[in-house]
Image (cartoon, rainbow, N blue to C red):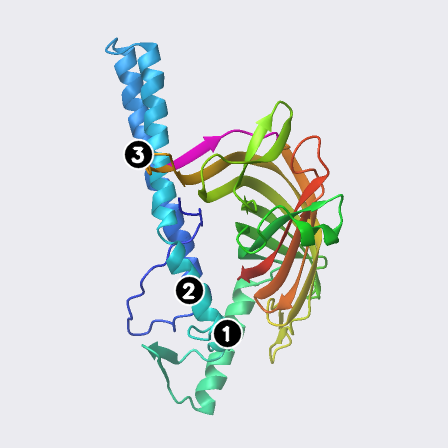
């Protein structure tokens, strides 16, 4: 079964006066598509649930039948969301690969000068009007008048769309050396994070120090080494050999986290001729230190194998697998502009009655 990723790739139609296609702009478009898919499925589910309730109120069906129907439609729409998003996995990986190979530009490679108002693109070609000095002076004069009229204040808070992905694993007794003998495949155990953050200066005046906070959904996947699955034995969860050869064995737990970071952003601020200073972020080196707290939303184990009759079986097991309900940990990132190296570490135990802690390494994209 396909891994859940909260990204789908949209195809852009080139229009006159449209901006040049960039990795960041494509990701923003994808996030809107994800919201649309989720909203449509939830609205459809809500409509069906209302119809079932009306049938029950009219006495057309029993209470037990109405509950059964509700569970069926809820399961159907959950599978629809999983399928629609899962089908886009290869496209997402291709998008990330294209960025790595330099086939798609970043927004930093595009024209971002606030004064270059007479620039537009057609396809991959950029065109620019020639502007005389008098035109520039007149335009700057009008801009100063607009700022004065509106009494525009310097913004102290900006927003970012956050996407992260990488490898996921566990530490035993908090020791990094335990990764050398981990029971989980390092490169095939992955995590994905999708969220939204706010970035606020500590002072009213432009500075380099910020507090960054928000909310994120995190998908952590663990794939055991060997032909093993997670099994619940009372209050303990262990890895056990499976009776059939496995093509897939994956434990996925989903978290809703609320991260808070102290960020040092060395971006150079924009200074205008009239003395105004505009705060600019994500234009230089950044360092973030902080942590997060959250709640586990659900846990599932996915198995794929062929039984004794050579029939392919895809099995989905839903259970808490003795995982902790609440989670908290430390996280940090360091990078240049919108791209950073990212690490996060759950300080709570992954499973009850164990000394294993989840740890993740990867890339993080903070898109203004």
For the residues labelled 1 and 3, say whether their Cβ atoms are less than 8 Å apart.
Answer: no
The mark total stands at 3
Image point 49% across, 77% down: which residue? 109
For the residues labelled 2 and 1, say whether their Cβ atoms are less than 8 Å apart.
Answer: no
Image point 34% across, 46% down: which residue? 84
Task: Say above or below: 201 vs 183.
Answer: below
Residue at the extreme front of the image, as rendered: 308
Residue 143's disc number: 1
Q: Secondary structure at mark 1?
A: helix
Residue 159's disc number: none
The residue identified by callout 3 is 44
- Which quadrant holds the N terminus? top left
The reply to whether residue 114 is in sight is: no
**Quadrant in the rendering for residue 180:** bottom right
Mark 2 or 1: the one toward you: 2
Q: CA distance from mark 3 to mark 2?
A: 30 Å
Mark 3 or 2: the one toward you: 2
Q: Which circle's residue, 1 or 3, is located before the other in the chain?
A: 3
Q: Which circle's residue, 3 or 2, is located before the other in the chain?
A: 3
Q: Residues within 10 Å of mark 2 (few under 14, many from 20)?
A: some
Determine whether, in the image, residue 335 is placed left or right of residue 89. Answer: right
Of residues 244 and 248, which is closer to you in this image?
244
Query: Which range of residues does the magenta coloring cover?
Result: 314-322
Task: Say above or below: 89 vs 273.
Answer: above
Of residues 327 and 50, which is closer to you in this image?
327
Task: Point out residue 284 in the picture as x, y percentages from the top left corner.
Answer: 63, 72
Residue 95's disc number: 2
Q: CA distance from mark 1 to mark 3?
A: 48 Å
Task: Point out residue 272 in the picture as x, y percentages from the top left corner.
Answer: 60, 77
């Amino acid at each position: 079964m396909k891994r859940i990723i909260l990204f789908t790739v949209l195809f852009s139609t080139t229009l006159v006066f449209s901006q040049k296609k960039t990795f960041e702009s494509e990701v923003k478009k994808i996030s809107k598509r994800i919201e649309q898919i989720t909203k449509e499925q939830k609205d459809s589910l809500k409509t069906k649930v209302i119809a079932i309730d009306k049938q029950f109120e009219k006495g057309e069906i029993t209470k037990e039948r109405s509950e059964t129907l509700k569970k069926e439609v809820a399961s159907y729409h959950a599978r629809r969301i999983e399928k629609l998003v899962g089908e886009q996995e290869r496209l997402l990986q291709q998008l990330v690969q294209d960025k790595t190979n330099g086939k798609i530009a970043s927004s930093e490679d595009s024209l971002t000068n606030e004064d270059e108002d007479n620039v537009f693109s057609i396809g991959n070609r950029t065109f620019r009007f020639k502007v005389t000095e008098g035109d520039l002076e007149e335009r700057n004069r009008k801009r100063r008048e607009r700022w004065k009229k509106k009494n525009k204040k310097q913004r102290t808070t900006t927003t970012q769309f956050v996407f992260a992905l990488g490898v996921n694993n566990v530490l035993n007794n908090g020791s990094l050396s335990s990764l050398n003998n981990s029971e989980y495949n390092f490169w095939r155990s992955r995590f994905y994070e999708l969220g939204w953050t706010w970035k606020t200066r500590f002072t009213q005046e432009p500075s380099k120090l910020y507090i960054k906070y928000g909310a994120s959904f995190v998908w952590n996947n663990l794939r055991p080494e060997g032909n093993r699955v997670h099994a619940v034995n009372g209050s303990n969860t262990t890895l056990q050999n499976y009776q059939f050869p496995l093509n897939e064995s994956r434990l996925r737990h989903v978290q809703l986290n609320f991260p808070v970071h102290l960020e040092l952003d060395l971006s150079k601020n924009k200074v205008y001729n009239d003395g105004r200073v505009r705060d600019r972020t994500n234009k230089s080196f950044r360092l973030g230190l902080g942590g997060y707290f959250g709640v586990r939303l659900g846990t599932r184990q996915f198995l794929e194998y062929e039984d004794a009759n050579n029939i392919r079986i895809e099995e989905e097991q839903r259970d808490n697998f003795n995982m902790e309900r609440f989670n908290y940990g430390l996280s940090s990132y360091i990078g240049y502009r919108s791209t950073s190296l990212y690490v996060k570490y759950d300080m709570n135990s992954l499973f009850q009655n164990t000394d294993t802690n989840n740890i993740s390494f990867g890339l993080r994209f903070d898109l203004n």
